[in-house]
Amino acid sequence: MQRLGIVMGMKTCNYLSLKPYILTSMWNIPGLQRFVLQFTPYRWTDFDWTPTKSFRRWVIMLMVIAMFLLAEVNTFYLKYVLWVPPPHFLCLGRLVFFLFMGATAMREVFQYLDDPKANKFGRQSWVISAIIITETLISVKFDPATVTKPLPRHVIIIWSVGFSLLSAWTVWNFFLKRFFYSLAVAKETASPKTKLLSLV
């Protein structure tokens, strides 16, 4: 279901970025329409996910995914630790806040990755990271017994296998594969010289 949402979101962004826009002065737009247009983006910027483009990009994408997962876990820990019932307005408010804040932070992360002139993360990325870490610290402070409970054996095995496969794939894709490719290219460029010497 999430994949369908991602695909539909990408199609919507592509449609909106290719749609022709007629630029006019803000004061020539009727009142209500002008008010609504204040909350739309100034322009659409495309960013490619391409997580395996480079090792640096891969590590940053893994850190982004880890922060997303930590924010999701914090949702449940905070409800449990602070005794907030699920229908409470704070739960929904937090999720809506993270929706908009996360969109801005992701845009800043991709700006940092894709723009050669950007040499640091944006403010929103740091702020949302600080909020997620603070939520984690609140959960640990107010109920350390729950957070530090030992995991069941099968969960540890599954996570260990997952981390091992991820680490092995990372080493293969970014180090070994490129090393073997450079060896093959070196051998291929050296082979015409060998053939030439054997003919002489």
Image: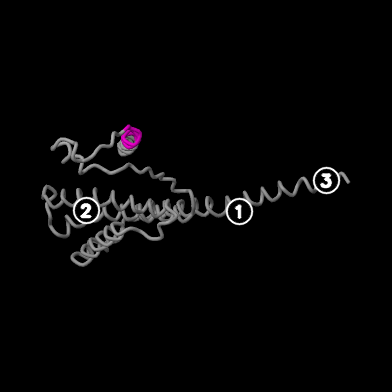
Type of amino acid under label 3: Leu
Q: Which residues are magenta?
A: 11-20
Magenta stretch, main secondary structure class: helix
Residue at the spot x=33%, y=50% of the render?
Answer: 107
Amino acid type assigned to the residue bearing label 2 in the image: Thr
Check contact, mark 1 vs mark 2: CB within 8 A: no
Instruction: Name which of mark 2 and mark 3 comes first in the sequence.
Output: 2
- Percent position (x, y) of residue 151? 31, 58
Question: Mark 2 or mark 3, which is nearer to you?
Answer: 3
Q: Residue 34 placed where, x, y %?
A: 17, 39
Horizontally, is 130 left or right of 194 in the view?
Answer: left
Residue 64 image position (x, y, % from top left): 35, 54
In the drawing, does residue 62 fall left or right of residue 150?
right
Q: How many marks?
A: 3
Relative to 194, say whether 80 is above or below: below
| Residue at screen point 71% across, 49% down | 187
Using the rendered view, name the quadrant where residue 79 is placed: bottom left
Estimate the spatial distance between the alpha carbons at disc 2 and disc 3, rounded to whole Å.
68 Å
Q: Which residue is mark 2?
A: 75
Near mark 3 (Cα within 10 A), the count class, few <14, some 14-19 or many ≥20, is: few
Residue that extends furthest to the bottom in the rendered view of this protein = 141
Between tags 3 and 1, which lies in front?
A: 3
101 vs 116, left or right, is left
Q: Nearer the viewer, mark 1 or mark 2?
A: 1
Q: Which residue is mark 1?
A: 179
Identify the residue under disc 3.
196
Which residue is found at the position 32% from the left and 37% from the top? 13
| Closer to us: 123 or 59 | 123
